[in-house]
Image (spheres, rainbow, N blue to C red):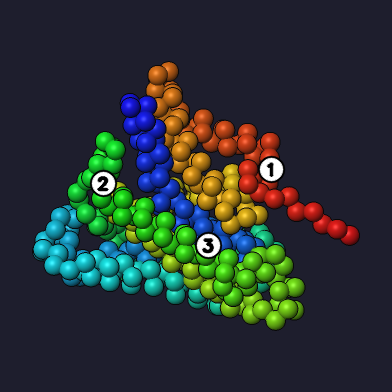
Amino acid sequence: MQIFTDILSILINALIPFSFLSLATFGIVLIFKTSSTTNFAQGMLGILGAFVTSYLIDRQGVLDITGMPSVVITSPMQLILPMLAGILVSFIAGLLIDVVIFRNAKYTNAATKQIITMGLVIIITGLIPIIFGATTRVSFAFSQRTTQLFGVNIPMHQLVTLMLSAIIIIFIFIMLKYTKWGLGVRSVASNERVAGLMGINTNRINSMSWAIAGACGALSAITYTAAIGSMQSTSMVEIQINAFYASILGGFSTFYGPLAGAFLLTTGQSVFPRILVSYNLAGWSDVVLYMAIIVAVLIKPVGLFGKKLVKKV
């Protein structure tokens, strides 16, 4: 029974950060597949939505400056509507980035596109204190209560976050599989020029991909910063770095590979400290984990779930 509880504890400790990481990872992969670039501004797109959410909640008087409730929350809409507004802002920001910038840089090389996303990081970082008056804000939680699952304590906020992430990821994969938009995304990911010749509106596909990636990033940032209790303009840096690690580990060539890589990464972050603590090396757990990822990539450069592309001449 103790072994079962330990295994369940490891899985829960892996699934909770996976709920944040999966959304950020999917946003990065979606943009990579359609725009052929690694988006270094994914975290900043998300934190922009989180700041909007916190600002709107604060304007309602739901939270005071210390983050403690200053009024009684009488309706879930007091939290849901600001969240939707924050997600919408990141959605629109992602859409505008593609329409205004990347549509005009479509046929530039990959390095140029990456530099553009780095510039976006600087721009959004500078805009946040101008718009919101500070680089740090308090966050909120869906609930301060905890519940037990098979003897393991789980904060309700994290359980709700896990459910939201699972619903959204499953819904997006269903859309990718069975809708016209999904067919367009897969076609553009395969070959954008050929997709355009076949009558697919590649500009629309790319714009929606950036917009959806922004929305996923916002939900990831909102739920993650709520879990840690506060937010800064740099709060999503760690999540974004791990999202890149997960994508490399799982392989950029598929949509599901990076998500599998994200789960393996969070599982490793849960397991390695437990193994190394007996050797007084718990502080080295991340180092060992990232070294293991490097070894895995050296053995299989396309990622654990990646597919090697074979070009015929």
The nearer-to-camera label among 3 and 1 is 3
Q: Camera-side residue: 68 or 299?
A: 299
Q: Which residue is mark 3?
A: 173
**Image position of 115 with respect to 280: above or below:** below
Label 3: how many Cα within 10 Å (few below 14, some 14–19, many 20+): some
* Residue at position x 35%, y 35% in the image: 9
Q: Earlier in the sequence, mark 2 or mark 1?
A: 2
Q: Which residue is mark 1?
A: 301
The quadrant the C terminus occupies is bottom right
Separation (CA) of disc 2 from disc 1:
38 Å
Q: Earlier in the sequence, mark 2 or mark 3?
A: 2
SS under mark 1: loop
Separation (CA) of disc 3 from disc 1:
25 Å
The nearer-to-camera label among 2 and 3 is 3
Q: Quadrant of residue 253?
A: bottom right
Label 1: how many Cα within 10 Å (few below 14, some 14–19, many 20+): some
Q: Earlier in the sequence, mark 3 or mark 1?
A: 3
Q: Is residue 163 left or right of residue 108?
A: left
The nearer-to-camera label among 2 and 1 is 2
